[in-house]
């Protein structure tokens, strides 16, 4: 096990996890155990003293988690070097969900009196965690239009207690992108750390550590797992000392650990990350162009279209465009519901990043409880459909969209 500096994503995801186990299992064993045994008191003492705390008690770590963590470490540090030119070492901690990983990120970096700066159009759970939980602990949360550099500088100046800037790029459902490198430069000049939610891009499209990020967050529930078979979250950091001490301590004490079966599903899912992303991305480009030319559609949000306000930022920092699209039906909320009811190939479900195409209608589903005025500020209009493009045959997908759009217009 351990870092082997493979060049390619598939080599990493196929060969980083442990093949070296007592019973010669080809796939990573599922270590379904709460605790680990010691041969003697001395051996126990040695293991408790050592750096590797993964073979003591599963809340502290587990060999199946380690295999998943090492794979993600290798993915996010792929081809990168540290300031001495040596391969970049990073640390990943696997959690029970994205929300659990984000809780560890915020709680280990922020305490009462500190300030967190983030931006509009975040994943709903992230924004609620900031405004309904973190706020209650005495941390000041400020959401701004982070594309406005003067406003960011002003906010930093007015809040010298700022410790962390949290970015999500591309962000759901309007695919807003943030210039990671530009924000990191400003943040670091103010002694502020930057975390990046890389869920939608995945390390296939974007490597935030290469752009200056201090932490990377994933809801591995999405593209990393790829099959919608479990929830997982990952928090990665470049400061190994900080990750192994404070972050690890908070993670273990908050108790948001994963479990061996879900970790196994993640390891299996990631094996095809590169193949899946290639197909997700090429299908998304075709679907976006198809939708963009359709008379029932007022507007398509996809970073690959030159009309997207952040097309240039996306192009600069991502290898290709992320396979997430949203589009506005001319017929408003009724057309939205009719479209959702009419699809036969696309799956009606929230979430994203599964092998099949998922469609949802935020105004009547995920964002139903948010007042229209509020949600429209974030671009969530009545006729907006969100689509996570899957790996189906493109002709089947386009035929499904054609018949569902025809019904939405009736
Ligand atoms: C799903 C998601 C999360 C939350 O992750 P869970 O695994 O559902 O806890 C955070 N950020 C983004 C961008 C997501 O899509």
Image: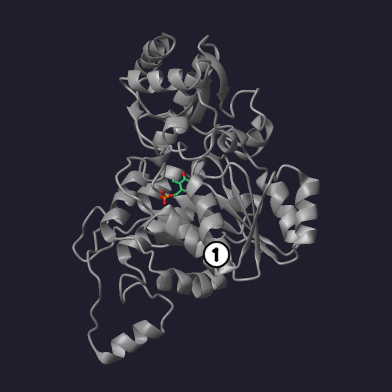
Residue 205: percent from the left, percent from the top? 53, 39
**Residue 230 drawn at (x, y percent):** 31, 48
**Left or right of residue 217: residue 230:** left
The residue at the point 61 percent across, 71 percent down is: 112
Near mark 1 (Cα within 10 A), the count class, few <14, some 14-19 or many ≥20, is: few
For residue 91, say whether it is visible. no
Task: Kindly indicate the quadrant of the structure image that contains residue 261.
Answer: bottom left
Queried on whether the Cβ of the residue with tag 1 lies below 8 angstroms from ligand 1, the answer reads no
- Pinpoint residue 361: horizontal percent, then vertical percent: 43, 29
Identify which residue, 301 or 145, lies in the foreground: 145
User: Residue at the spot x=75%, y=65% of the render?
Assistant: 160
Q: Quadrant of residue 9?
A: top left
Q: Nearer the viewer, residue 319 or 358?
A: 358
Left or right: where 407 falls relative to 150: left
Residue sticking out furthest to the bottom:
42
Q: Is residue 52 visible to the viewer in this orientation of the structure? A: yes
- Check the image and report above or below for 65 versus 319: below
Badge 1 element: helix
The residue nearer to you, when weighing 53 against 377, is 377
Quarter containing the N terminus:
bottom left
The percent coordinates of residue 142 (x first, y second) are 66, 54
Q: Which residue is mark 1?
A: 136
Screen quadrant of the C terminus: top left
Count of labels in the image: 1
In the displayed structure, 80 sits above or below 10; it is below
Colour scheme: one colour
Tell which of 337 and 385 is nearer to you.
337
């Amino acid at each position: 096990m351990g870092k082997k500096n493979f060049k390619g994503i598939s080599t990493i995801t196929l060969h980083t996890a442990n093949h070296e186990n007592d019973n010669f299992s080809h796939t990573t064993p599922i270590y379904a155990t709460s605790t680990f045994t010691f041969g003697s008191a001395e051996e126990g003492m040695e293991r408790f003293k050592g750096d590797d705390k993964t073979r003591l008690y599963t809340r502290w770590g587990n060999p199946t988690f380690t295999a998943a963590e090492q794979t993600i470490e290798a993915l996010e540090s792929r081809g990168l070097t540290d300031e001495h030119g040596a391969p970049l070492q990073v640390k990943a901690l696997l959690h029970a969900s994205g929300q659990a990983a984000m809780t560890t990120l915020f709680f280990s970096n922020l305490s009462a009196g500190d300030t967190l700066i983030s931006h509009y159009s975040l994943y709903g759970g992230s924004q609620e965690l900031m405004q309904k939980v973190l706020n209650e602990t005495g941390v000041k949360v400020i959401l701004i239009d982070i594309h406005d550099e003067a406003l960011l500088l002003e906010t930093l100046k007015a809040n010298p207690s700022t410790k962390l800037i949290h970015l999500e790029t591309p962000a759901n459902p309007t695919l807003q992108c943030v210039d990671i490198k530009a924000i990191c430069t400003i943040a670091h000049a103010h002694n502020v750390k930057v975390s990046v939610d890389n869920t939608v891009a995945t390390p296939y499209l974007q490597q935030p550590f290469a752009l200056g990020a201090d932490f990377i967050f994933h809801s591995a529930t999405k593209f990393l797992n790829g099959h919608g078979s479990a929830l997982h979250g990952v928090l990665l950091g470049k400061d190994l000392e900080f990750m192994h001490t404070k972050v690890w301590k908070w993670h273990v004490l908050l108790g948001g650990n994963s479990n061996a079966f879900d970790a196994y599903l993640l390891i299996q899912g990631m094996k095809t990350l590169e193949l899946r992303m290639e197909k997700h991305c090429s299908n998304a480009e075709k679907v976006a162009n198809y939708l963009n030319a359709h008379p029932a559609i007022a507007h398509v949000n996809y970073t690959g279209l030159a009309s997207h306000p952040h097309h240039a930022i996306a192009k600069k920092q991502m290898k290709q465009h992320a396979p997430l699209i949203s589009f506005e039906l001319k017929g408003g909320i009724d057309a939205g519901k009719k479209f959702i009811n009419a699809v036969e190939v696309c799956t009606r479900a929230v979430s994203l990043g599964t092998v099949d195409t998922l469609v949802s209608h935020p105004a009547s589903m995920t964002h139903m409880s948010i007042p229209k005025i509020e949600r429209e500020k974030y671009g969530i209009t009545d006729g907006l459909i969100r689509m996570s493009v899957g790996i189906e045959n493109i002709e089947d997908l386009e035929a499904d969209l054609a018949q569902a759009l025809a019904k939405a217009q009736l």
